[in-house]
Image: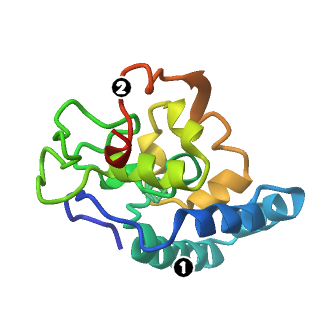
Amino acid sequence: MTNDARPRPFRPRLGARLGYALHAGLAANPLYARLAAWLERRPRAYRAFTAAERVTKQELFGCRMCGQCALPATGYTCPMTCPKQLRNGPCGGVSPTGGCEVYPELTCVWVVAIERAEAAGHGTDLDLLHRPIDQRLREQSSWVNYWQGRDDDLWTSAPLLRRELGLQPVGKR
Ligand code: SF4
């Protein structure tokens, strides 16, 4: 099953601090790499695993199964729920109160991301520059891709100078 609905800002249902804590348990290691390789050799098991990932992450983050997960660098807020699917946001259309340009009644996912990351002590994550994603990996398991080391270059360590541009969480202005 694919997510055909148009992307719409989604407010995560899992706290960012818990997200960071859970990530520590899912961090790539040789054991997970072997599990990922095992899953990729068994299509039925891979499909079942990917389906479980889809259900879990759709419920918690509005995941759209891009296959290259940015959550650990975005305060556990999915950038693919941005109507423009920006991996480096917010866009120039975000309102002064943090509203999405496309859905003004909803808060921009990048504003949510900055607020959540800052509150959890990971604000500097939002200074990282995300590279374009590989669209061919859509619908794949991002956990498997991560454990296989395919996510290593998803974002750079170069700062975006976000703070110098005056982009701060709404509540901190
Ligand atoms: S895998 Fe992609 S679409 Fe799913 S939560 Fe992560 S960034 Fe969002």
Residue 68 is at least partly visible in this image: no
Residue found at x 42% / y 74%: 13
Residue found at x 60% / y 64%: 17
Pointer 2 residue Cβ closer than 8 Å to ligand 1: no
Measure the C-alpha gap from mark 1 to mark 2.
Answer: 40 Å
Q: Is residue 138 above or below residue 96?
A: below
Horizontal and vertical percent position of residue 94? 20, 39
**Rendering quarter of residue 35:** bottom right
The disc labelled 2 sits on which kind of residue? Gly
User: In the picture, which quadrant includes the C terminus?
Assistant: top left
| Mark 1 vs 2: CB contact within 8 A | no
Residue found at x 41% / y 67%: 12
Q: Is residue 27 left or right of residue 151?
A: right
Per the image, the residue denoted by label 2 is: 166
The disc labelled 1 sits on which kind of residue? Ala
Residue sitting farthest toward the right: 30
Q: Is residue 96 left or right of residue 139?
A: left
Local secondary structure at mark 2: loop
**Rendering quarter of residue 167:** top left
Per the image, the residue denoted by label 1 is: 52
Residue 160 is at least partly visible in this image: yes
